[in-house]
Amino acid sequence: MPDYQPPLDDIRFVLDNVTPIGDLAKLGPYGHADADTVGGVLDEFARLMSDVWAPTNEVGDVEGSTLSGDEVTTPTGFKAAYDAYASAGWGAVPFDEAYGGGGFPWLVGIVMQEMLNSANMALAMAPLLTQGAIDAILHHGSEEQKEKYLLRMVSAEWTGSMNLTEPEAGSDVGALRTKAVPADDGTWRISGTKIFISFGEHDMADNIIHLVLARTPGAPPGTKGISCFIVPKFLVNEDGSIGERNDVTCVSIEHKMGIKASPTCVMSYGEQGGAVGYLIGEENRGMRYMFTMMNNARLSVGLEGLALAERAYQDALQYAQERRQGSAPGAPAGESSFIIDHPDIRRMLMTMKASIEAMRGVIYLTAERMDIAMAHPDPDIRQAEQEQVDLLIPVCKAWSTDLGCEVTSLAIQIYGGMGYIEESGVPQHFRDARITPIYEGTNGIQAMDLVGRKLPMRAGGVVEDYLSMIASLDPALEKAGDGLASIRTNLADALTVLADTTGWLLHHGLDDPRDALAGATPYLRMFSLVTGGWVMARQALAAKAIIDQGNGDVAQAEAKLVSARFFAEQLLPAVKGLQAPVTAGHGGLFAIDPAQLAG
Ligand SMILES: Cc1cc2nc3c(=O)[nH]c(=O)nc-3n(C[C@H](O)[C@H](O)[C@H](O)COP(=O)(O)OP(=O)(O)OC[C@H]3O[C@@H](n4cnc5c(N)ncnc54)[C@H](O)[C@@H]3O)c2cc1C
């Protein structure tokens, strides 16, 4: 089975040309993260991913995590791979230096996460969930809580878990019932059941810091009555050492279609009288605190889609160059061709390649904006960048995870019958990818977020600024001449359709929200395609500059220009066909009642 090779050249192309890492280093806090230093960090990290993490991916799928009593055992090699990551300090790279972090831009952390997820997505979920818990404590915890938990979580010695979901509270988190009652000593006692908790229990770290959403006595109903608690698996003594076992256990783990090595746990809190919990911030503000970490978490899940697409592409590309079948047009008589020479296989490979490059550009660009929004000295720029991040997050999450499923499915198609056979390795990527449009807010919820919350930001001003920014690339594309002409025309056409459709949605969202919600998912796809088209146009301009000046890797630049053109000419035109579904309104969806849907 093919191995995973971190695509460092592709990653560097984006970091050098689309989201210049050198510019971020000019912002005070990231001064030490110049391009050379970041390059060195990524080279070394890539070695760990290809040599240590990637080989554990298949065994993880075959063995899965197992539960015995209330203890979860991860598959062979997982603990060693996690230890290698933690002991070298890799988990700390993008976090605050005050808590032992490396203080690197989030963009660098995101690039590393791409490699983590390509190498082994199921294992990468441990650092991902820890990141969510760190974010919540860092932004809303007390100084004492930060000192007690963050150092060991940032160092990856301890992991974190996020406990939102309950049997009756999935997309509607506000329906949760887990209880928290105050104890005499200022702590709380937590009781209730949480389901689907990733890495709620495992054998890779000495302690697990659970973040648990619960209701305090008399809390208002819905999301306004949710509080957030730290519930450690082992209580932590005053001197930082590990103390008594807390009243929280894993009672079962799910049998899933993918990410089988990631233990998805049913967690029971308080069977012995109440798990000791520590309130984060104030009562009833838990949902607000979750929003703080949501952008990071959703960007990271979008990245899972990109990462699996990349790994599946590498496999499919290799297979297409080794498998001979049929005779491609123009092949010598009597000789069977490599399937890569068939136009339909090329179509699939180019679709995969262009989609991956567009996703990578959009996700890295959003991470870069997060860094600017955090660190720029000008508050107006910080706010403008944050608005753009908020607008782009549902796009990064939903588009990249949908594409993750589509691209991994294309890999299976390229393998033909072998793609349906587990030993080929490609079905795992597809099965692993399938969860990503579901968790961290289903993609339907992302589309509703884009249409219902993000478009109306600043009375439509934020999206208007965004569309104007895309339009402002036109003079550079015009100046670039004939070589980029099709990119220019297709982007301009798609942008016009997006602007019209956005206006329709803003209007109908006010008139009858059902119309806007009915078109939300095709609209998100339309928005994403235009965003991808814009990023690929920037890629094309950068590639053309390298080719014209003969300065840099010209062969790579030529390939980048070709994939940008492919995206503009063959993927972007789909925008036009999406306008009718977006603007159809809700009538057709509800024209027959549920009984009639059956026949
Ligand atoms: C492998 C795995 C790992 C997970 N890890 C975690 C974890 O670590 N922590 C955690 O807390 N949770 C976790 N989850 C839970 C996950 O976040 C939820 O499954 C997800 O939020 C969806 O909730 P649900 O399953 O209840 O589906 P439902 O909410 O019942 O949704 C069913 C369908 O209805 C749609 N829908 C629901 N409400 C609306 C609406 N208002 N408008 C339009 N459509 C709607 C949804 O989009 C979906 O298509 C995990 C789940 C899985 C499977």
Image (spheres, helix red, strand yellow):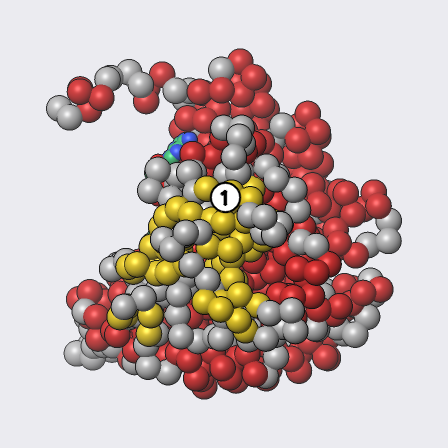
Taking the image in four quarters, ligand 1 sits in the one at: top left
- How far across and down, in percent of the image, does residue 278 sit? 58, 53
The C terminus: image quadrant:
top left
Q: Residue at x 74, y 70 (%)?
A: 97
Numbered disc 1: secondary structure: strand
Asked if residue 520 is positioned above or below residue 259 in the image, the reply reads above
Q: Residue at x 35, y 64 (%)?
A: 263
Q: Residue at x 66, y 46 (%)?
A: 281
- How far across and down, in percent of the image, does residue 363 sit? 57, 56
Which sits in the foreground, 297 or 532? 297
Q: Is residue 452 left or right of residue 328?
A: right
Query: For the view shown, which residue lies furthest in the front direction?
Result: 184
**Any part of residue 132 in sight:** no
- Number of numbered discs present? 1
Q: Is residue 361 left or right of residue 440?
A: right
Asked if residue 446 is positioned above or below residue 503 in the image, the reply reads below
Amino acid under disc 1:
Ala
The residue singled out by tag 1 in the image is 180
Asked if residue 190 is positioned above or below residue 304 in the image, the reply reads above
- How far across and down, in percent of the image, does residue 571 sit? 45, 48
Which sits in the foreground, 582 or 303? 303
The N terminus: image quadrant:
bottom left
Which sits in the foreground, 226 or 190? 190
Q: Is residue 179 left or right of residue 459?
A: left
**Any part of residue 249 in sight:** yes
Asked if residue 11 is positioned above or below residue 523 in the image, the reply reads below
- How far across and down, in percent of the image, does residue 103 sit? 73, 69
Q: Residue at x 77, y 43 (%)?
A: 383
Other residues around mark 1 within 10 Å, as few (<14) / some (14–19) / many (≥20): many
Which quadrant holds residue 335?
bottom left
